[in-house]
Amino acid sequence: MCGFVGCFDLSSGGAPIADGLKEELRSQVLEMSRRIRHRGPDWSGVYTGNNAILSHERLAIVDPLSGKQPLVSDDEKIILAVNGEIYNHKEIRREFEGTYKFRTQSDCEVIIPLYKKCIQEIESKNADSTNFEKMIEKLSGIFAFALYDSERDAYLIGRDEIGVIPLYQGWDKSGRYYAASELKALEGDCVTIEEFPNGCYLWSKDEKSPAKPRTWYHRPWESFESVQSSPRATDDKGEIINPGVIEKVRNGLETAVKSQLMSDVPYGVLLSGGLDSSIIAAITQKYSKKRIETDSKEAAWWPQLHSFAVGLEGSPDLIAAKKAADYIGTVHHEVHFTIQEALDALPDVIYHIETYDITTVRASTPMYLLARVIKSMGIKMVLSGEGSDELFGGYLYFHKAPNAQEFHEELVRKMSKLHLYDCLRANKSLMAWGVEGRVPFLDKDFIDIAMGLNPSDKMNIRLPENAEHRGNGGQRIEKWILRKAFDDMLPSEIVWRQKEQFSDGVGYNWIDTLKKMTEEKVSDAEFARRENRFPVNPPKTKEEYYYREIYSRLFPSDSAARVVPHEAGVACSTAKALEWDAAWKNMDEPSGRAISGVHDKAY
């Protein structure tokens, strides 16, 4: 995982940028790239062409010696900068044996021959520009890339299906187009900044839509009708009637974890003691003794798996994580932080995560502190449990879903917004210290398995009084099917532990202090004038106002303010789900403790 900045000036109709201006733009791009060097502290590279400049900051995970970027094609006509990992690169390499001469062992280089094949088909009239959809669909991984074709004076920008990897686009006062891994690279140089949409690509020679990204990611499960007839694992009473469905979930996730263990540097796992991170840690331990790159034929270079947990002294997560680690057998590390340390870090956290969203700031702060310790120990990559709650309806507000259709449609909405919240938090909090985060739950194939399940199997149905795993309110515990799939790999108290949002699990006093502190720091008079102070997305609470003040000092443009999501919700719900419970009508609290009657320690 890395960071890049691309500048493209194709407005001159093919004429090269004048040398004087080119040197000026090169210096500017290098300065923009310097702002994101934390993402790639291992190497810096730059390409300067007639109408494009690409700068890359590298974090070396795969092929540290020869995988410097920007990558250049075998004929030196295509230049590529990538942030991310392509997990199926070996399979794609085999496809091009004898037709393309790879210059590195980088997993990202496979994008070049895929592009060359695609553009040849387009120019031979056997396909049109929508052929890029098929090209990018072949990639299994997390990625954002900028490719420049010097022969055709054209560029292709693409981003992974969920938006695990951040990507922004902008335009300067002369209309030049920029793409960058973080917003801070563009702020101050671009007059307009937008997030580049996930699951999309932009081809500059697209005759129909040269300036608007097209969607390459299409899935049938986005429609409730396509999943409502999927095979059921359980009946309406919660009795198992088809264990094969549960087995499919297990096998799919194990395959996803194994594929994401490719690494030429030390790696570890984040372990909060919650269900999701514990499952990922347990599966990782299963495969950690052998090198995945050699089909498990040789011993791993770093055979002991290290796990990391963060929290206030005595927090719920630290206690649970220790139980899980002892059972799994990892070398476990507890990172304790104090409230004051976390408060002191807030400006740095907001600078790195580039948002003023309340739940993201709350959860990013302990993760940011944790990442610094992980990096100090020489770990450069960690696996995490992000995405499970969006796939299986793990947030406690899902207990209030009125029916299977509403349940599924909320999952689809949550999946479409992951890039704005959990993926953003995990990526930028870790990459602030040059640590790569991988998210096996969001493997493309596993997403199809999980989202293709019958929604009735995911719902928190009401169970008989004597039923196992009956939670508060008499309903089946959230993420039941996932828990059942892995109940033999973890201690029972971990498998059946109630969902605890990360910002709650690190210690309830963290959120409580933030709410109290911001209530005191922001006066009633200031808050009353919030629409004058912040006409773009006025803060809805004093806590948000406090974060917005910090954000506006760091990113003062209106474009930067608009990039941040601004939506009411409860316990991480979307605004639409507020309709499920009349008591939520005037609520705006992302903590899971806001769900009374469900959370064991609700407000």
Image (cartoon, grey):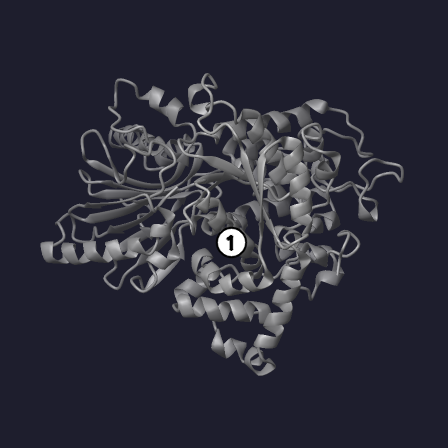
Whether residue 297 appears in this view of the structure is: yes
**Which residue appears at 73% of the width and 56% of the height?**
595
Q: Where's residue 262, x and y in %?
A: 44, 29
Q: Amino acid at mark 1?
A: Leu
From this viewpoint, which residue is outermost toward the right? 466
Q: Is residue 470 left or right of residue 29?
A: right
Q: Which image quadrant for residue 202?
A: top left
Q: Where's residue 130, x and y in %?
A: 36, 37
Whether residue 395 appears in this view of the structure is: no
**Which residue appears at 54% of the width and 49% of the height?**
422
Residue under label 1, please give it: 369
Q: Where's residue 7, x and y in %?
A: 25, 52
Q: Where's residue 563, x and y in %?
A: 44, 59
Q: Is residue 483 left or right of residue 345?
A: right
**Which residue appears at 63% of the width and 60% of the height?**
510
Q: Secondary structure at mark 1?
A: helix
From this viewpoint, which residue is outermost toward the bottom? 525
Pick the front one: 559 or 302: 302
Q: Which image quadrant for residue 45?
A: top left
Residue 236 sits above or below residue 434 on the image: above
Q: Is residue 245 left or right of residue 38?
A: right
